[in-house]
Image (spheres, rainbow, N blue to C red):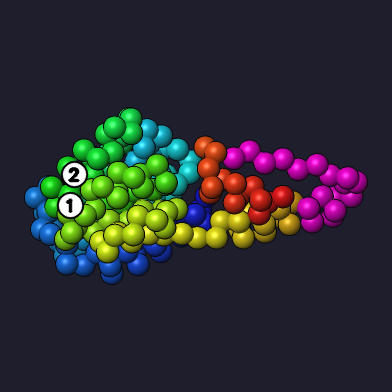
Amino acid sequence: MKKLSVLVLVLFIGTMLFAQGGRETTAAPKDGRPTIRLLTDATGIDDKSFNAAAWRGIVQYYGDTVQNAANRGRLYDVVTAQTQDMYIPNLRQAADEGYDLIMVTGFTWADALSQVAPQYPNQKFTIVDVDWVGQPNVMEFIYSEEQGSYLVGMVAALQAKEEGIENPRFGFIGGVPGATITKFQMGYV
């Protein structure tokens, strides 16, 4: 999870280069740093997965911690959509409030973002795990998750061999079924 958090932080900093030139935010006073709103699905920022890693990366970027998010509401914020019918209104609200960058994680946001992004051509958006939104103001992040899980599978097999376990059995428990989880699984096994 720590490596995922670092990855999200690196992606976030790269995104900040992309996000320069966004509109002035009405929701948060500026101190020279970009403002960001993270939009999550119902699992929120405590999902122990993408949302949690994105949130951790954001607060670390601003020099805060998850336990002490001092700049929350001023430089960054998070809104959780309890249902998918809130995706479009939440995207529009964040854009109307003028955050420099609006970030969503996961494929469930792709359709809503595809609808909203063209309506706000000067707003910068990012989405993780999607490469089919295809709008000039949307930065899409894809990574080869199967490669990391392949290495984890190799480590597990080597550890079993080192411990003298004959015919070891390995299991995989994924998250919500989808292309990303399938890639993790295929890399691992």
Stretch in magenta:
157-174
The earlier-in-sequence mark between 1 and 2 is 2
Horizontal placement of 50 versus 87: left or right? right
Residue 68 in view of the camera = no
| Helix, strand or loop: magenta stretch | loop
Residue furthest to the bottom in view is 17
Q: Residues within 10 Å of mark 1 (few under 14, many from 20)?
A: few
Which circle, 1 or 2, is nearer the viewer? 1
Q: Is 65 in front, or is 115?
A: 115
| Residue at which label 1 appears | 119
Quarter assignment of residue 17? bottom left
Q: Residue at x 21, y 38 (%)?
A: 89
Q: Residue at x 82, y 50 (%)?
A: 160
Quarter assignment of residue 21? bottom left
Residue 30 in view of the camera = yes
Horizontal placement of 148 versus 127: left or right? right
| Type of the residue with mark 1 | Gln
Q: Which mark is residue 149?
A: none
In the image, residue 164 lies at what x, y percent? 89, 50
What element does badge 2 sit on?
helix
What element does badge 1 sit on?
helix
In the image, residue 78 lies at what x, y percent? 28, 43
| Residue at which label 2 appears | 92
Residue 170 magenta-drawn? yes
Q: Is 90 in front, or is 157?
A: 90
In the image, residue 88 lies at what x, y percent? 25, 40
Quarter assignment of residue 81? top left
Residue 25 magenta-drawn? no
Q: Are marks 1 and 2 in contact (CB under 8 Å)?
A: yes
Q: Residue at x 26, y 47 (%)?
A: 115
